[in-house]
Image (spheres, rainbow, N blue to C red):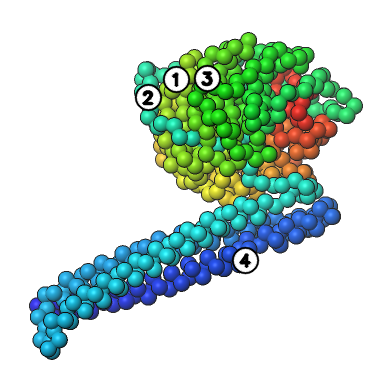
């Protein structure tokens, strides 16, 4: 019996020694890694930014552009490799310490069963052993805790350094900051409750009604009710759109109207009405313009709502206080602001209902646009304190349901699509894409696929969802109860503009000015084109053409095709970061503090 226990002790001693040595080694590496990151730039952003400076002096150097892209790709890979190593090292260290403690306990238990003939100090010997094991265990746990702290600090420092230092300046635009802040993407909620309210009608009946009503309805298609068109998918159902204009001479500029307060939200349209919002730190307004003349029909102040915080949230200059695009169903217009205020107005500008959702805990400012489906306002409220998606009743503003989300801060907007058998709400935030039932808020499916601060929204076509994010990757997801990744690519990414897809073609805009076309089902690249100026505005597919406005106000119009063919590049003459809207053969563009109508 003693021999068995002695063998047992020997075995677990070996396990403990191996675990201890590995734990010490990993601890040393984690601590050393932390100080290495503090001393150096792990993603070589200084090198990349130096190359960009050279390119600004010689913008036609194609070889230098390719070199910058290669360094950028290496930077992304270096960042995610390093963070993976830190996370893995932390997990391994915790496991090894647990193994070490368990080994010591097993050894202790076995030793108690052995009767040993010791010398005169035998009574002190067990106590000495007990103290030794105690201090070894305490030392191992303390070492592990210190190392895990350093691992967390390294991970956090890497993330901050990567986000802050690798904001590579846009090609041909050295004065503009290519930040990860978003203009027309999305964000988060503050400290509201997470109780879901049951729907009054069964989800199966209601969702069948959605399919029967042919979402999107013909009325939705005839108008432009939400950010990036119906459901937020980047497709407009319009015809006879102009391809040539000039803001300086006024060619094909039907009218131009000043917008009273600043904002980065895009126009939405229903009937003869165009809606926008504007705000400052102290005032919030919703505007309605005449679509034919540009005349301001009404302006409604929605400041100081009941329950709103008296203190304005901190926002960045390129997000502002009214980045989210409003939504309309033809009977009311719905708007949300950076402080969490959400309001519904009738078509005369009269307040129907209003409430405050809590100030979003977000380091850039709230920018997720509103979506509408089956008499519900859908709000993606992913922020640091309590990420969730919320559905409010369009008529009353009452909460229909709210679903908590285990995700990080996101600036992407919801996507609402009819997949044939049902309508789904799809949201994008680290680490996953998740689909929800619009009637209950219940999860349909989800798939882990991304990293970092998410800005671009999703795109959908023919059963495939496309998700991309700067410094992460582009993924094509075959949706369903068991979703799977069809293909992925990390060559061309975006931190603000969103993709668009249809008919087995996928268009990817990048923030630094390159646009790429892929075969949607396989990821085969058909073409890429460098426009030389970065994009914040998202592309819209309309009448077989892509309309994509760059930050300098040039609209790049090209065929939606396997072969790149430019159709026109008319200039507005104003800087622009907002996505345009389309209706009645006209384009409506928010730029330079004004609203433009462009038409033949």
Front one among 532 and 478: 532
- What's the mark number on residue 40? 4
Quarter residue 481 falls in: top left
Q: Earlier in the sequence, mark 3 or mark 4?
A: 4
Q: Earlier in the sequence, mark 4 or mark 2?
A: 4
User: Is residue 292 something that shows in the picture?
Assistant: yes
User: Is residue 541 something that shows in the picture?
Assistant: no
Where residue 82 sits: x, y (%)? 54, 61
Residue with the most extreme front position: 310
* Residue 591 left/right relative to 338: right
Q: Can you say which quadrant of the picture contains the C terminus?
A: top right
Where residue 216 sits: x, y (%)? 55, 21
The residue identified by callout 2 is 197
Q: Give the foreground label among 3 and 1.
A: 3
- What's the mark number on residue 398? 1
**Mark 2 and mark 1: span between their CA atoms?**
10 Å
Residue at 16% from the left image edge and 81% from the top image edge: 124
Tags 3 and 1 in contact by the CB under 8 Å rule?
no
Quarter residue 192 falls in: top left
Element under disc 4: loop
Element under disc 2: loop
The residue identified by callout 3 is 354
């Amino acid at each position: 019996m003693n021999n068995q226990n002695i063998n047992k002790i020997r075995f677990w001693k070996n396990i403990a020694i191996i675990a201890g040595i590995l734990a010490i080694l990993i601890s040393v590496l984690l601590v050393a890694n932390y100080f290495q990151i503090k001393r150096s730039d792990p993603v070589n952003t200084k090198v990349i930014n130096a190359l960009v400076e050279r390119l600004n002096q010689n913008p036609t150097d194609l070889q230098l552009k390719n070199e910058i892209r290669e360094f950028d790709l290496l930077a992304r890979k270096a960042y995610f490799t390093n963070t993976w190593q830190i996370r893995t090292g932390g997990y391994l260290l915790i496991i090894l310490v647990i193994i070490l403690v368990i080994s010591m306990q097993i050894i202790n238990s076995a030793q108690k069963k052995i009767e040993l003939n010791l010398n005169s100090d035998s009574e002190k010997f067990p106590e000495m052993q007990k103290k030794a094991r105690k201090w070894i265990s305490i030392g191992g746990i303390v070492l592990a805790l210190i190392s895990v702290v350093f691992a967390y600090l390294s991970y956090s420092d890497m993330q901050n350094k990567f986000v802050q230092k690798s904001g590579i300046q846009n090609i041909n635009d050295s004065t503009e900051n290519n930040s990860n802040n978003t203009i027309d993407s999305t964000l988060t909620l503050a400290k509201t409750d997470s109780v879901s309210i049951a729907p009054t009608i069964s989800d199966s009946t209601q969702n069948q009604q959605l399919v029967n009503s042919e979402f999107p309805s013909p009325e939705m298609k005839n108008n432009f009710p939400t950010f990036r068109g119906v459901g937020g998918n980047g497709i407009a159902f319009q015809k006879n759109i102009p391809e040539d204009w000039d803001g300086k001479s006024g060619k094909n500029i039907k009218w131009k109207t000043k917008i009273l307060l600043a904002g980065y939200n895009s126009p939405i349209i229903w009937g003869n009405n165009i809606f926008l919002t504007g705000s400052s730190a102290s005032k919030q307004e919703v505007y309605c313009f005449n679509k034919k003349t540009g005349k301001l029909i009404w302006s409604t102040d929605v400041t100081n709502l009941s329950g709103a915080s008296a203190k304005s949230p901190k926002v960045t200059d390129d997000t502002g206080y009214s980045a989210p695009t409003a939504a309309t169903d033809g009977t009311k217009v719905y708007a949300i602001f950076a402080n969490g205020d959400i309001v519904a107005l009738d078509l005369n500008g009269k307040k129907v209902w209003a409430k405050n959702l809590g100030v979003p805990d977000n380091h850039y400012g709230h920018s997720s646009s509103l979506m509408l489906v089956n008499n519900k306002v859908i709000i993606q409220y992913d922020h640091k304190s309590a990420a969730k998606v919320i559905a409010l009743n369009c008529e009353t503003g009452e909460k229909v349901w709210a679903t908590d989300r285990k995700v990080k801060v996101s600036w992407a907007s919801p996507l609402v699509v009819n997949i044939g058998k049902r309508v789904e709400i799809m949201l994008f935030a680290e680490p996953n894409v998740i689909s929800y039932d619009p009637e209950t808020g219940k999860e349909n499916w989800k798939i882990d696929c991304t990293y970092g601060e998410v800005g671009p929204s999703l795109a959908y076509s023919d059963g495939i969802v496309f998700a991309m994010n700067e410094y992460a990757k582009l993924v094509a997801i075959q949706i369903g109860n068991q979703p799977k990744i069809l293909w992925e690519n990390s060559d061309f990414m975006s931190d603000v503009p969103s993709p668009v897809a249809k008919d087995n073609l996928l268009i990817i805009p990048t923030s630094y000015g390159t646009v790429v076309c892929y075969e949607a089902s396989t990821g085969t690249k058909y073409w890429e084109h460098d426009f030389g100026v970065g994009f914040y505005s998202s592309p819209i597919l309309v009448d077989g053409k892509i309309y994509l406005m760059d930050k300098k106000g040039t609209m790049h119009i090209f065929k939606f095709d396997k072969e790149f063919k430019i159709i026109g590049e008319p200039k507005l003459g104003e800087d622009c970061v907002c996505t345009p809207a389309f209706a009645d053969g006209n384009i409506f563009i928010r730029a330079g503090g004004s609203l433009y109508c462009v038409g033949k």
